[in-house]
């Protein structure tokens, strides 16, 4: 496994989230080091996706603090958090079906674009240059994920695995340092899951810190530095896959006696 740098890169301190009378995340604390590949598992309703929504600013925290690279981010809007170098994919992909593959990825390049509204309206020089740069950058991300031959196709023409790779390419276009993946291999075959795992490891080798939510234990076991297990919004275990699969609380809550 990859050796991470010392010190927390992402840190949650006593984070809770309430929806009315329901507590979806309960006093959750953990830290992630730069370069780590950490998976978050737990049964349905454990608070996993809510957790990602809290870290990325989609939802406000009820209590607690979230820190990224020494800066508190739980009070920042989602677009500010994105600009700090955090990106994510979504379980339902959220692709733009009326745009081509490369145009979907170009949407993710917005962080470094500086053109003003009048420049866009009149298609002035900087707009054209930024468009060219975004196109080239997007081609690079698509090539990284094996989609270079699908550039001008529509998402509807892609296989499920390719659509999932496209969603990740769009997240990578923003040049993040920390990437969240929400159940990235749902619906894929064993062979496709193995291919996906190899791709995630390659992204980590390029310097990304990665947190991912997943139900498929073969992927979690194969690539995780650490595993965090949630149940009813609380952390019930944390450690390597070998450590957590021997934990009686994890066996009872999620993995099953077998």
Image (cartoon, helix red, strand yellow):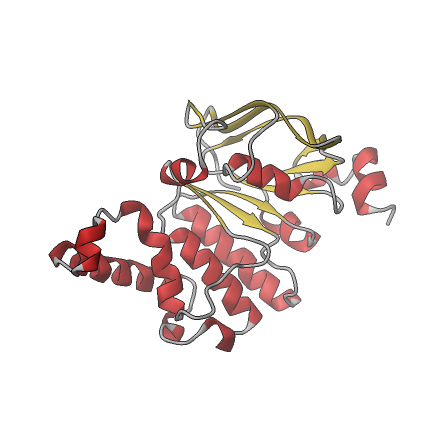
For the residue pair 233 and 176, the one nearer the viewer reads as 233
Q: Is residue 55 left or right of residue 115?
A: right
Toward the left, the furthest residue is: 125
Which residue is painted at 55% across and 67% down in the image?
161
Where does residue 183 sit, x and y in percent of width and height? Answer: 62, 53
Up the image or down, 230 lies above or below 183; here it is: above
* Residue 80 placement: quadrant: top left
Q: Is residue 136 left or right of residue 215?
A: left
Q: Is residue 132 left or right of residue 3?
A: left
Where does residue 155 sit, x and y in percent of width and height? Answer: 47, 71
Up the image or down, 132 lies above or below 157; here it is: above
The answer to whether residue 225 of the structure is visible from this angle is no
Which residue is painted at 58% across and 56% down in the image?
184
Where does residue 145 sit, x and y in percent of width and height? Answer: 43, 63
For the residue pair 167 and 36, the one nearer the viewer reads as 167
Q: Is residue 28 left or right of residue 202?
A: right
Up the image or down, 232 lies above or below 186; here it is: above
Which residue is painted at 39% across and 48% down in the image?
206
For the residue pair 20 and 65, the one nearer the viewer reads as 20
Which residue is painted at 45% across and 53% down in the image?
202
């Amino acid at each position: 496994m990859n050796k991470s740098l010392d010190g927390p890169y992402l840190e949650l301190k006593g984070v809770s989230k309430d929806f009315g009378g329901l507590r979806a995340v309960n006093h959750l604390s953990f830290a992630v080091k730069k370069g780590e590949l950490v998976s978050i598992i737990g049964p349905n309703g454990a608070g996993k996706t809510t957790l990602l929504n809290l870290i990325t600013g989609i939802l406000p925290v009820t209590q607690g603090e979230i820190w990224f690279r020494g800066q508190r981010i739980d009070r920042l809007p989602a677009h500010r958090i994105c600009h700090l170098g955090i990106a994510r994919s979504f379980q339902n992909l959220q692709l733009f079906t009326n745009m081509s593959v490369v145009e979907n990825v170009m949407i993710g390049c917005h962080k470094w674009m500086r053109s003003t509204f009048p420049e866009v309206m009149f298609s002035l020089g900087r707009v054209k240059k930024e468009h060219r740069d975004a196109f080239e950058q997007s081609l690079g991300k698509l090539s990284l994920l094996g989609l270079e031959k699908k550039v001008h196709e529509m998402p509807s023409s892609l296989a499920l695995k390719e659509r999932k790779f496209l969603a990740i390419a769009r997240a990578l276009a923003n040049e993040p340092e920390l990437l969240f993946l929400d159940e990235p291999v749902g619906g894929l075959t064993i062979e496709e899951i193995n291919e996906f795992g190899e791709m995630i490891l390659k992204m980590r080798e390029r310097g990304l810190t990665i947190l991912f939510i997943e139900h498929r234990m073969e992927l979690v076991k194969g690539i995780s530095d650490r595993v965090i297990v949630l149940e009813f919004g609380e952390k019930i275990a944390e450690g390597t896959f070998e450590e957590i699969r021997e934990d009686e609380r994890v066996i009872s809550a999620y993995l099953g006696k077998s």
